[in-house]
């Protein structure tokens, strides 16, 4: 890592959700290494404890469910008045359930975590970024937000919506100095459970996935894209959905 990269986030405070494992954790580690102070949140407190022990003063942790408005309030309280960046990484899968097999609990939970929490936390930080005239928001979408054949209906819907949310937010607030972009991963080595809970989905999706999905990416590869979008290195980039999927989007 060059001297410039080491100082890229010096003096900046950045919120990262889903910070306890996978892409979120890798993003926190990289941000702290490059000088940021990270407000890291995750639903599993033990993961945050381990992260805090590893990174020390570079991270402040907030345990809780990001879909809970009280947790968002806690995050904002800890973050303070100056928030330079937000990475909405937290997300959950849907068991690959197709439309006719979706239960209400799965639908409501997937939309709450993958979309509504993203909106609420983004809405909460925007006034502070707008007042400062600067800020960068990065949402983690998915290859499932680019097509209909990468997940179940609930997850696919949530990630398509994240893409639209990203573009609309960028449209409204880029003129005020706040950029908003999304990263769309393919398969990544994370702790997100993704079992098939539908025989029809496995029959329909299985052959496609076996022949089209590139090798599984490492979380650090996604963290590199996220931190680039959070940084001033991407100062002229807003409103994009960046496919970081090993070429899956080209298939």
Image (cartoon, grey):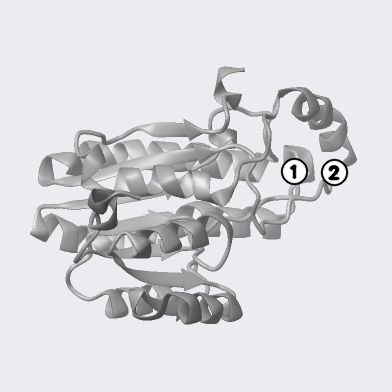
On screen, residue 219 versus residue 6, left or right, reads right
Q: Secondary structure at mark 1?
A: loop
Q: Secondary structure at mark 2?
A: loop
The crowding category of the residue bearing disc 2, from other C-alpha atoms within 10 Å (few below 14, some 14 to 19, many at least 20), is: some
Residue marked by disc 2: 198
Q: CA distance from mark 2 to mark 1?
A: 7 Å
Residue farthest to the front, as pictured: 2
- Residue 251 located left or right of residue 226: right
Q: Residue at x 44, y 63 (%)?
A: 29
- For image coordinates 17% across by 73% down, the residue present is 81
Residue 197, given in percent of the width and then of the height, sits at 83, 49
Res 121 seen here: yes
Return the mark for residue 187: none
Mark 1, residues whose alpha carbon is within 10 Å: few (<14), some, or many (≥20)? many
Q: Which residue is mark 1?
A: 96
Sequence order check: which comes first, mark 2 or mark 1?
Answer: 1
Asked whether residue 63 is in view, the answer is no
- Residue 184: image x %, image y %? 50, 38
Q: Position of residue 244 (x, y in %)?
A: 50, 35
Tags 2 and 1 touching, CB below 8 Å: yes
The image position of residue 202, as x and y in percent, is 85, 36
Give the answer, above or below, for where 115 lies relative to 16. Answer: above
Q: How many marks?
A: 2
Q: Quadrant of the C terminus?
A: top right
Compared across the picture, whether 22 is left or right of 97 comes to: left
């Amino acid at each position: 890592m060059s001297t410039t990269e080491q100082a890229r986030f010096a003096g900046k405070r950045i919120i990262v959700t889903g910070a306890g494992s996978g892409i979120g954790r890798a993003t926190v580690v990289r941000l702290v290494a490059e000088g940021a102070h990270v407000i890291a949140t995750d639903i599993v407190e033990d993961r945050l404890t381990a992260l805090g022990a590893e990174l020390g003063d570079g991270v402040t942790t907030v345990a809780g469910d990001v879909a809970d408005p009280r947790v968002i309030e806690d995050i904002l309280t800890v973050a303070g008045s100056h928030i330079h960046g937000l990475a909405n990484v937290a997300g959950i899968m849907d068991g690959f359930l197709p439309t006719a097999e979706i239960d209400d609990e799965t639908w409501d939970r997937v939309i709450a975590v993958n979309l509504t929490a993203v909106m609420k936390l983004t809405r909460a930080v925007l006034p502070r970024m707008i007042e400062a005239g600067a800020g960068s928001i990065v949402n983690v979408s998915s290859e499932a937000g680019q097509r209909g054949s990468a997940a179940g209906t609930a997850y696919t819907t949530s990630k398509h919506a994240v893409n639209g949310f990203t573009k609309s937010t960028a449209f409204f607030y880029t003129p005020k100095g706040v950029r908003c972009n999304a990263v769309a991963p393919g398969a990544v080595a994370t702790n997100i459970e993704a079992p098939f809970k539908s025989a029809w989905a496995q029959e329909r999706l299985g052959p496609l996935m076996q022949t089209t999905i590139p090798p599984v990416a490492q979380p650090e590869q996604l963290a590199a894209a996220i931190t680039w979008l959070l940084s001033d290195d991407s100062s002229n980039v807003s409103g994009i959905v960046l496919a970081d999927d090993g070429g899956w989007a080209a298939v």
